[in-house]
Structures are given as structure tokens and as C-alpha cells.
């Protein structure tokens, strides 16, 4: 744990993009949401009389933070990279590590691991955790050779978050629609497509913070207004498009109504997943729970959205914390992510 009084102040860094190099035009909504989040974090810190600098990263991250001495400033890291470039979020975290900053969130390694969903799934499977069966498809021509997963299947980009590239068409029922959706992902998002077994079940999110991790109240997406199981997904519209049916009909129930046995099972799986992937400070695990109460991990989200309207703060609020209290608590758990720099403080 750090003591903010030992530092001059906090630098809130975030990405600010006016265009994307991949995806669809509407994806800018989620890209620009981080600007609002950065403003909310800054206001929360200033309300506690903490000197705070708000620093957008528009081009070169190195130059954006160059004037902030790592022995004088803590970084509140909201940066995800410019223009939607792949793996920029982990690269910026590695930059902060190389400069020796204390910063919030996870290390570059943990972010890179959890950004690559196929790598995450392979890793989790080896540790005994459940995740939907899957293929990684690099070209639509590979599809004809794969017949070992039954339809319906779920198709998404292998290295995106915030539901980018996920729509109603992501659930496919035959080889033609599978090929079409794989082509869409590859052509528009310039990456391989992850094809997963579709898990029919309850969608639960487990938000966690502290060191070691402690779970916040679990959340569930309420899909009661969706007629078919295959339409019960958190697509891009459900997360970001306020006027859509999906956005208006996917309320969050927090705390989720779970039996003591299921609560224990989900909690154990979520904490194990976070520990195995090296996530720190704050994170979220998304999963589907089948009728026989088996949790299948869909993804691990290091550095999830901290906006006042986002799911993470919803869980924090249910735990009895205000927004400024959340921000300070996360900041107090900021750390250096390399032992190389652990001696530096003794020279101040």
C-alpha cells in the first residue's frame, strides 16, 4: 500500500481518440467513454484535496508522461491506447513499469494475457477452471475442417473488450452464418476470430479489489425480456447504445440472488482465475453459470470501467462505498510491478 502524502500528487492518464484504425464507427462510443471516466476520477481526487493532473494520451505515451517524476507522482492508469490499436493497453502498462511508477491496475503481463482471450482460455483450462470449448480461427477457410463443436456457436474477436465486435449476429446456427461472422471479425477487426460453444445460462460478473483480492457483491444480467436463450448476450448495443432495446432491457441485479453453495463455487472460481492470471488492484471476472451450477469463465477484465454508471462501481456502491472512497481505495493499492525498482524509495 502506498501513502499518497509521500507524493506530490496523482496523474490520471487516459486515451483520447478521434478515430479508430479498425472496427465500426460506433465503436468510438466506448473508446470515448474513458474520457468521461477520467474526468470523474479526477473530480473525485480533487474533492479529497489531492493534487491531480489530467493527462490525455493522444499520440506518444512516453512523451505524455515524461515530465512527471516517478518518485513524485502516482499514475492512475486508465489508458487503453490510441485509435483502438491492439495490445496498446499492455504496452502502456509496460512503459509505466519501465519508468518505475506506482500505478493503479494490473501489470502489462496480466493485461496482455487477459486481452488475448484464446491465451487466457488455454491458461485457465490448464489450471482446472471451466471455460467454453473453443476454436481460434485465422481464416474462414479453416471452418470446413472443424466439426467438433455443436451449434449454436458464439463468434467474437480474440483480443477486444467492451463487447466490441459483438452483435446479435455473433450467435450462429450453421456453417454459412459461422463463415460470414468469422469473415466479419477478421475483415473489420484485423485479428483472428474466437469461436466458442454457446453456454446457455445465467450471466454473472464478479468484481474484486484489494490485495489480496476480495470479492465485491456479485452481479447478474437480467435477460427476462429476451425470448430465446441465444438472444441473451451482452452485445455492444446492450453496453453502449442507450436508445436500443438491448440497452434498456439488460438491467443488472446486484447482489445476485444465489444459493450459498453457488455463491461459494462462483467466488472460488473467480478468485482462482484472478490469482492464476496475475491480475492486481481491481478486476472483473465474467462467467456463465449452467443449470447444474457449473461456472464457465467467459473472460477476465483487468482494469475494468470505473465510470460512475459502470458495473464495477455498482458493486462497490452495494458494498457501501462512495465513488471518491472507491477511487482512493484503488489508489492506495497502487504498486510498482517490478522488483527492480523496490529499492528506489530508500533514496528519497
Image: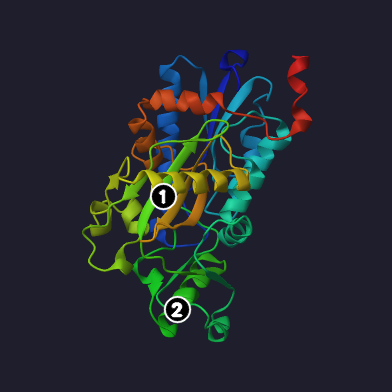
- Which color mode does the image show? rainbow
Q: Which residue is mark 1?
A: 30
Q: Please determine whether, in this image, residue 123 is positioned above or below residue 183.
A: above
Instruction: Determine the residue positioned at 59% across, 74% down.
Output: 138
In this view, the residue in front, 184 or 299, is 299
Q: Which residue is mark 2?
A: 150
Q: Is residue 342 left or right of residue 211?
A: right
Image x and y of residue 95, in percent: 68, 40
Helix, strand or loop under label 1: helix
Mark 2 and mark 1 lie on one chain; the one further toward the N terminus is: 1
Q: CA distance from mark 2 to mark 1?
A: 32 Å
Helix, strand or loop under label 2: loop
Categorize mark 1 by other alpha carbons within 10 Å: few (<14), some (14-19), many (20+): some
Residue extending farthest to the bottom is 144
Image x and y of residue 81, in percent: 56, 47
Q: Is residue 245 left or right of residue 308?
A: left
**Which numbered disc covers residue 154?**
none
Image x and y of residue 191, in percent: 57, 66
Q: Is residue 81 visible?
A: no
Amino acid at each position: 500500500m502506498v501513502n499518497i502524502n509521500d507524493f506530490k500528487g496523482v496523474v490520471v492518464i487516459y486515451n483520447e481518440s478521434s478515430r479508430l484504425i479498425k472496427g465500426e464507427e460506433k465503436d468510438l462510443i466506448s473508446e470515448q467513454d474513458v474520457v468521461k471516466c477520467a474526468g470523474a476520477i479526477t473530480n473525485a481526487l480533487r474533492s479529497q484535496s489531492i493534487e491531480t493532473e489530467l493527462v490525455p494520451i493522444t499520440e506518444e505515451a512516453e512523451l505524455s508522461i515524461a515530465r512527471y517524476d516517478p518518485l513524485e507522482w502516482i499514475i492512475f492508469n486508465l489508458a487503453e491506447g490510441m485509435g483502438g490499436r491492439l495490445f496498446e493497453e499492455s504496452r502502456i502498462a509496460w512503459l509505466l513499469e519501465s519508468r518505475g511508477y506506482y500505478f493503479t491496475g494490473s501489470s502489462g503481463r496480466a493485461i496482455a494475457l487477459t486481452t488475448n482471450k484464446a491465451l487466457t482460455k488455454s491458461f485457465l483450462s490448464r489450471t482446472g477452471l471451466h471455460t467454453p470449448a473453443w476454436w481460434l480461427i485465422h481464416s474462414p477457410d479453416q471452418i470446413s475442417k472443424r466439426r467438433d463443436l455443436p451449434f449454436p456457436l458464439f463468434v467474437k474477436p480474440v483480443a477486444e473488450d467492451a463487447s466490441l465486435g459483438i452483435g446479435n449476429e455473433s450467435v450462429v446456427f450453421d456453417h454459412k452464418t459461422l463463415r460470414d461472422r468469422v469473415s466479419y471479425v477478421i475483415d473489420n477487426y484485423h485479428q483472428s476470430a474466437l469461436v466458442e460453444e454457446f453456454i446457455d445460462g445465467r450471466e454473472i460478473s464478479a468484481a474484486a479489489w484489494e490485495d489480496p483480492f476480495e470479492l465485491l457483491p456479485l452481479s447478474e444480467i437480467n435477460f427476462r425480456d429476451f425470448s430465446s436463450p441465444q438472444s441473451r448476450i451482452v452485445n455492444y448495443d446492450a453496453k453502449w447504445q442507450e436508445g436500443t432495446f438491448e440497452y434498456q432491457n439488460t438491467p443488472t441485479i446486484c447482489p445476485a440472488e444465489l444459493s450459498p453453495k453457488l455463491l461459494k463455487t462462483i467466488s472460488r472460481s473467480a478468485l482462482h482465475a484472478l490469482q492464476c492470471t496475475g491480475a492486481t488492484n481491481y478486476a472483473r471476472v465474467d462467467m456463465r453459470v449452467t443449470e447444474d451450477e457449473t461456472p464457465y469463465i467467459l473472460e477476465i477484465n483487468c482494469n475494468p470501467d470505473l465510470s460512475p454508471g459502470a458495473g464495477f462501481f455498482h458493486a462497490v456502491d452495494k458494498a457501501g462505498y462512495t465513488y471518491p472512497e472507491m477511487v482512493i481505495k484503488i489508489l492506495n493499492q497502487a504498486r510498482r510491478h517490478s522488483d527492480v525498482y523496490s529499492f528506489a524509495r530508500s533514496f528519497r
